[in-house]
Image (cartoon, rainbow, N blue to C red):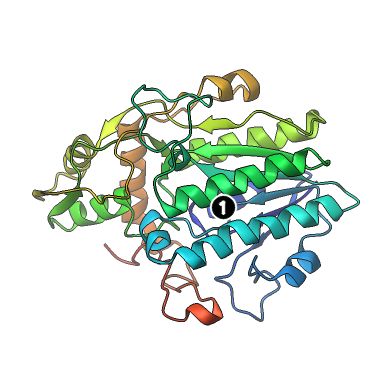
Amino acid sequence: MKIAITGSLGLIASSLMERLQKTDNVRSIGFDIRYGKDSHNYLDITNTLKVKEKLTDFDVIIHLAAVSRVAPAENNPELCNKVNIDGTQNIIDVCLASNKKPYLIFASSREVYGNQDVLPVSESAILNPINTYAKSKLSCEKLIIEAQKIGLRGFIARFSNVYGGMYDQKARVIPSFCINALRNKDIVINGSDTILDFLFIDDAVDAILKIIHFTQTHNHSYIPIINICSGRATSLEQLSQTIISKTKSNSKITKLPKANFAVDTFCGSSALAHQILEWNPKFDLETGIQKFIENLGNQNKRNLNLKNINMRIEKYENFKGYSWLPAEI
């Protein structure tokens, strides 16, 4: 089986690539805009011709490339829509045109639900996207659903807040809290009563592997949209206290108001993922945080040849969308 992964240098995809490379009878190839332009693995998904050239001969395409953080998307809405929506349409078109009729596995987000009054949130909840990123992800879902009507074999997974990978962005909640705790610096919380659902990277990768297996054993054009989440609600204050405890840190907590475009209440139901994929998360928050902290301490042993490279798309020269974890804590 030949698998393409877009956004292969990102948080989820980098860990997924490692697992797939150890899987028998699977050849996986990663594509990302953060590779050098002279690399075969370089791909700007907004470039229609290059997408057709590089993604035509696969059995499965796992689409993880995106402007993937809420704040940068809010500050760069044109770029967010171009990458997330137009880029996804390019990949859909390749899937429909390919003789192989590959399965498209699309990583959507719990952001499409917005704030919900009833927890945990099931897939049938009324969607209420409140920011540019969420609206772009919902637009992508609609494109895939429409394409399924004309033969696309697609699978949409809505991920909650994934953490724990070594190619994560240092400004995201758990990496920034952990890095500051390890340095005994203040932890700044934007919205201490914000409740989120945090999913450890190994569980996210396990879910994708289950999805890949499902696509190879079920020849359906339409599959229900599925939440991939922990099912555990955690406030940002609880999270910060857990991290301080695990790191034995002297950090103090500074509380600030949340951003007006940020979702402040989410915990998902993974019942449908269990029913369809036979998947359940294995890591509780405390275990996942502990493992992530240990990995941060050992990260100087890893080989990150491309760390701290920023995303560039020609007309958006000043947009710095990505940064990897620092080389030293």
In the rendered view, tell whether residue 12 sits above or below residue 238. below
Q: Depth check: 79 or 162 in front? A: 79
Q: Depth check: 263 or 16 in front? A: 263
Quick check: can you spot residue 62?
yes
Side of 64 where 104 appears, left or right: right
**What's under tag 1, amino acid-wise?**
Ala
Residue under the image location 39 percent in, 54 percent down: 70
Q: Position of residue 270 (x, y in %)?
A: 50, 24
How many marks are shown on the rendered structure? 1
Q: Position of residue 1 (x, y in %)?
A: 80, 46
**Based on the displayed image, in which of its 4 quarters is residue 191 positioned?**
top left
Q: Position of residue 129 (x, y in %)?
A: 44, 42
Q: Depth check: 3 or 270 in front? A: 270
**Based on the displayed image, in which of its 4 quarters is residue 198 positioned?**
top left
Question: Which residue corresponds to mark 1?
Answer: 13
Quarter of the picture containing the C terminus is: bottom left
Q: Position of residue 45 (x, y in %)?
A: 65, 65
Residue under the image location 53 percent in, 27 percent down: 123
Residue under the image location 46 percent in, 27 percent down: 282
Residue at the right extreme?
99
In the rendered view, tell whether residue 176 sits above or below residue 273. below
Side of 100 where 76 appears, left or right: left
Residue under the image location 50 percent in, 67 percent down: 79
Side of 200 where 276 appears, left or right: right
Quick check: can you spot residue 12?
no
SS at circle 1 = helix
Q: Depth check: 118 or 50 in front? A: 118
